[in-house]
Amino acid sequence: MRELRTAQKTDLPAIAALEKACFPLGVSEDTLERMLSDPMTVMLCVTEGGTLLGWGYFQTVLDEGYVGDLAVIPEARRRGVGTMLVKGMTASARERGLAFLTLEVRQSNLAGRKTYEKCGFREAGRRRNYYEKPREDAVLMTVYFRGEDEEC
């Protein structure tokens, strides 16, 4: 059975491996350990039978939330893991009283953009040539919390 929960220290090696596999400049295990102890960082993961399926995090500044990464293992993509993570992050952001949660996503990541839209995020702008390897624009997406129900 899948479980959405706060990441723990024992999850860090698997998260670091997923980061390295998904992102050319992925977060290192040392950085993950520092993030885990930071009260302004929320790290969530989805596991099944002790196996990490995906993870994501956001950081808070005052009443603002910024998603840093969200990654799902290839075998679990398009099976609701990303949606679980996005729902978990938006719920946590609401609980913390944040005004909004925002992120950047590769322009070509249509599946990710569709998941974020389904969860209430809307395009808020673009950053030209934001990503490297390959060079690509970032689509800025934001969900504002005004008390309305989540769409996800």
Image (spheres, rainbow, N blue to C red):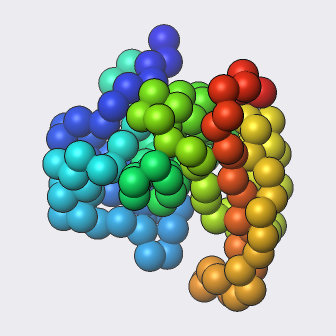
Tell me if I can see residue 3 in this picture: yes
Q: Position of residue 38 (x, y in %)?
A: 21, 51
Image quarter of residue 55: top left
State whether residue 107 is above or below residue 142. Answer: below
Q: Position of residue 76 (x, y in %)?
A: 61, 36
Image quarter of residue 140: bottom right
Tell me if I can see residue 80 in this picture: no
Q: Position of residue 41 (x, y in %)?
A: 33, 49
In this picture, residue 85 sits left or right of residue 32? right
Instruction: Tell me what residue is drawn at x 45 percent, y 28 percent.
Output: 95
State whether residue 50 is above or below residue 22. Answer: above
- Which one is in front, 89 or 85? 89
State whether residue 55 is above or below residue 51. Answer: below
Instruction: Tell me what residue is drawn at x 42 percent, y 34 percent.
Output: 96
Q: Position of residue 84 (x, y in %)?
A: 59, 28
State whether residue 148 is above or below residue 21. Answer: above
Query: Residue extending furthest top?
Result: 1
